[in-house]
């Protein structure tokens, strides 16, 4: 398990690491970047004095001052709109939308403004920014604290959509996002903040401090964007997934005994197509897994890409496992969540096909 | 049981419609010189009367009167007059070019020329305007933006600085402090506040100037911008150009009935002024006042410029369907060019002959610019930017999927 094949991991052994939760890793990424670049500013609801409702920005205001890390009014459109202006000035804002479920008032500023400023002005103005937002369910958050809206972003040309699955990637991807000159939507699976949740909600989660991927270098490093990870190499079938579902899929592979190759996309769009195509051509079988609702979900795009690029290598129809096409329910959360059983059943079906 | 009367929905109506002259008494026009000028370090609450009054400098005889008379010498005034005339001539020629299909679409600023021109004079190099599509006078008032280049944008030709991606009029001139125009209304208002906040974060001295029309103040971004500007005391001028009409809807549909747009600012804790937007001197004086506040860390100022949209909303609009044909001629604040001309003549710094001469020179200048622009192509003759340009600048570096799509198109 956990064999990372991407080049950026090669130097990992050489860097001094400390155990970090995903929260600490994200905070460390912002700390490192605020230290390195005066133009990096952090703001959002509750992120200043208090340090964010998930504590991700804790201590940054005390360390860098109120003009580099500050509280914002409850206005997602205002937060992103102000960030566009700051980006146009020359700053690199990192803003927090308290929950991904709350980004909708900022849609116009993301879709029509941040994403298109470079294009429409032919590069005269740009708006580099990172928009962080906790996403996904599994915390009894109901329909307003559980959504996974990634497909609404991957459909928009001009922005990048990123979702890490562990502290090491979270820090490296956040640094890469802040340094990137395109606007980046940085989705943080909140169920993974404290440990690798495998979908068994009735069992305690092992904290990141006891996990290899919770060993995070203290200093600067990047996990490059547009680069997927082969999270678990395997021969029987390919699972294409990201975020929390990486761990659920890994659990399903373990429980079914199938030798699944699990691809953690990390960057959803633009993505690393080669890693997907190479894997599916090798295994000939493919399951696409995400927590978001099924219809017109990002899985639909992934299935199309596999079909377009690997059709003659496929031994079975591609399977999709996703959230049901309902709002995220509260009490029925675990009937909604595509846990290891549903993923495992799809893996078995694809092996029979 | 208590008897209640049936409730009625109020849908505001303008006082005039085609065939029925507008009653402009709703404007509440103060006489020139009547509104006081507080010190720039005043409070928002202290500007309450200014938000309901109307700051004016030029009286009916063309004399500059009252506390808002600005320090502008005759040379600058003549420059302003020429810039406004140039804007109007530019608009006129581009309207004809649009009818000739040399450009797909155009938006003129007829009647609103004083606002951008005088405001531009009140700003300093490095300041950044976040305009709407009717502030071409901000650019045309400057000496450093060639008209032929603006026309290349309008004609979407091979020298179009926007590479054919934007509708005509959606200019972007960072070097002239003119932010890329979106077309999605109001978005630029909060962006201007963000830009000003950034300037303050960096300890810079530059200020931002945000622009919006009366209609778009109904958008959330307007209110958000006021909140952010107030909260962070952002160095920004918040301009509301109230030209009475948002396409076919009268300003009362945007919420201007029995109140003013300037009054919105006072409620948000922002010093606010309501100003005669057709009075070049008043526009300059109020803009300077606001700029001084912004530059002195005294925070934002909201200015409602009262004016009138003299022409159609765009070349796709026909205002004879919804407002009286002679509305602009009857507008109580008059024509900004005629008023500044009258003032310059009244103070002995201009004449009818000079005016005629300037008109001829400017017409020739604009015609020459158009000739040069057309030599690089028009939308009509097909000399447009390459389709390959379509795939560039979506991201800083072209991702693989766009490379493949460009290959598929064969460009």
Image (cartoon, grey):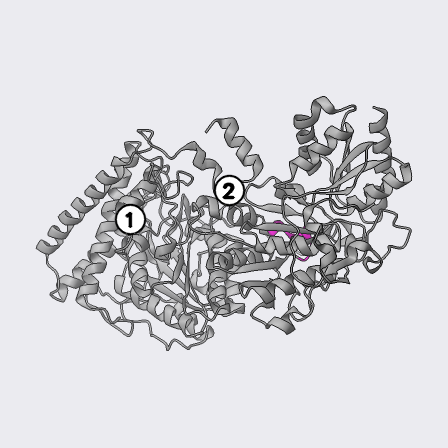
Magenta stretch: give its range: A98-105
Residue B112 visible in this rendered orientation of the protein = no
* Mark 1 vs mark 2, CA separation in Å: 35 Å
Instruction: Give how far across and how far down residue A1 sits, in percent.
Output: 83, 45
- The residue tagged with tag 2: helix, strand or loop? loop
* Residue sitting nearer the eye, A195 or A139: A195
Closer-to-camera residue (A307/B115): A307
User: In the rendered image of this protein, does residue A301 appear above or below residue B346?
Assistant: above
Q: What numbered label is drawn on residue B394?
A: 2
Residue B258: in magenta span: no
Q: Can you see residue B287?
A: yes
Residue at the image point whose x is 79% and y is 39% from the top: A233
* Residue B208, label in figure: none
Mark 2 — on which chain does it sit? B
Instruction: Say whether residue B203 is left or right of residue A65.
Output: left
Taking the image as shown, residue B241 lies to the left or right of residue A260, namely left
Residue A66, compared with residue A315, is above or below; it is: below
Proximity of marks 1 and 2: CB atoms separated by less than 8 Å: no
Q: Which residue is mark 1?
A: B110
Which label's residue is closer to the chain start, 1 or 2?
Answer: 1
């Amino acid at each position: 398990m956990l064999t990372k094949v991407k080049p950026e991991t090669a130097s990992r052994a050489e860097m001094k690491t400390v155990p970090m939760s995903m929260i600490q890793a994200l905070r460390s990424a912002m700390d490192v970047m605020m230290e390195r670049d005066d133009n990096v500013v952090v703001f959002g609801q509750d992120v200043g004095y208090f340090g964010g409702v998930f504590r991700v920005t804790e201590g940054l205001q005390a360390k860098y001052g109120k003009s580099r890390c500050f509280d914002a009014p409850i206005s997602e459109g205002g937060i992103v709109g102000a960030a566009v202006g700051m980006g146009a000035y020359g700053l690199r804002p990192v803003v927090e939308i308290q929950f991904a479920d709350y980004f909708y008032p900022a849609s116009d500023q993301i879709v029509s403004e941040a994403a298109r400023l470079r294009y429409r002005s032919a590069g005269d103005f740009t708006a580099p920014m990172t928009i962080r937002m906790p996403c996904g369910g599994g915390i009894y958050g109901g329909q307003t604290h559980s959504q996974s809206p990634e497909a609404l972003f991957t459909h928009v040309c001009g922005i990048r959509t990123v979702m890490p699955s562990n502290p090491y990637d979270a820090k490296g991807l956040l640094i890469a996002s802040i340094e990137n000159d395109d606007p980046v939507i940085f989705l943080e699976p909140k169920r993974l903040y404290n440990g690798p949740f495998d979908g068994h909600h009735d069992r305690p989660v092992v904290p990141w401090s006891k996990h290899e991927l919770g060993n995070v270098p203290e200093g600067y490093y990047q996990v490059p964007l547009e680069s997927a990870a082969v999270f678990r190499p395997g021969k029987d079938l390919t699972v294409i997934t990201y975020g929390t579902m990486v761990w659920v899929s890994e659990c399903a592979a373990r429980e079914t005994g199938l030798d699944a190759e699990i691809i953690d996309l990390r960057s959803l769009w633009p993505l690393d197509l080669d890693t997907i195509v190479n894997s599916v051509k090798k295994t000939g079988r493919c399951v696409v897994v995400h927590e978001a609702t099924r219809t017109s979900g990002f899985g639909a795009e992934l299935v199309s890409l596999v079909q377009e690029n690997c059709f003659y290598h496929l031994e079975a129809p591609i399977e999709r496992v996703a959230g049901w096409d309902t709002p995220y329910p509260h009490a029925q959360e675990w009937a909604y969540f595509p846990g290891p059983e549903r993923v495992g059943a799809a893996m078995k079906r694809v092996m029979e096909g | 049981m208590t008897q209640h009367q049936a409730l009625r929905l109020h849908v505001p109506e303008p006082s005039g419609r085609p065939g029925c002259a507008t009653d402009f008494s709703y404007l509440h026009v103060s006489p020139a010189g009547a509104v006081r000028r507080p010190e720039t370090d005043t409070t928002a609450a202290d500007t309450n009367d200014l938000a309901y009054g109307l700051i004016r400098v030029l009286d009916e005889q063309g004399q500059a009167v009252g506390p808002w008379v600005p320090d502008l010498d005759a040379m600058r005034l003549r420059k302003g007059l020429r810039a406004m005339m140039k804007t109007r001539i530019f608009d006129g020629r581009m309207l004809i070019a649009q009818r000739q299909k040399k450009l797909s679409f155009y938006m003129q600023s007829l009647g609103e020329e004083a606002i951008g021109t005088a405001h531009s004079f009140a700003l300093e190099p490095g300041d950044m305007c976040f305009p709407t599509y009717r502030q071409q006078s901000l650019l045309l008032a400057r000496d450093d933006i060639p008209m032929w280049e603006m026309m290349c944008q309008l004609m979407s030709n091979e020298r179009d600085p926007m590479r054919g991606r934007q509708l005509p009029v959606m200019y972007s001139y960072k070097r002239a402090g003119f932010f890329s125009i979106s077309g999605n209304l109001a978005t630029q208002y909060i962006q201007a506040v963000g830009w000003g906040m950034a300037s303050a974060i960096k300890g810079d001295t530059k200020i931002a100037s945000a622009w919006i029309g009366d209609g778009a103040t109904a958008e959330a971004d307007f209110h958000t911008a006021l909140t952010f500007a107030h909260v962070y005391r952002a160095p920004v001028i918040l301009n509301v150009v109230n030209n009475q009409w948002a396409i076919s809807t009268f300003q009362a549909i945007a919420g201007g009935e029995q109140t003013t747009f300037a009054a919105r600012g006072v409620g948000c804790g922002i010093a606010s002024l309501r100003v005669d937007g057709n009075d070049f001197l008043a526009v300059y004086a109020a803009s300077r006042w606001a700029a001084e506040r912004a530059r002195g860390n005294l925070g934002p100022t909201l200015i409602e410029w009262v004016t009138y949209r003299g022409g159609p909303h765009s070349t796709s609009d026909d205002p004879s369907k919804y407002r009286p044909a002679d509305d602009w001629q009857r507008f109580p604040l008059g024509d900004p060019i005629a008023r500044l001309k009258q003032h310059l003549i009244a103070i002995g710094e201009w004449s009818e002959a000079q005016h005629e001469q300037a008109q001829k020179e400017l017409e020739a200048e604009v015609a020459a610019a158009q000739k040069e622009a057309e030599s690089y192509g028009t939308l009509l003759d097909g000399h447009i930017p390459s389709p390959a340009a379509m795939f560039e600048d979506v991201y800083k570096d072209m991702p693989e999927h766009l490379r493949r799509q460009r290959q598929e198109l064969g460009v």
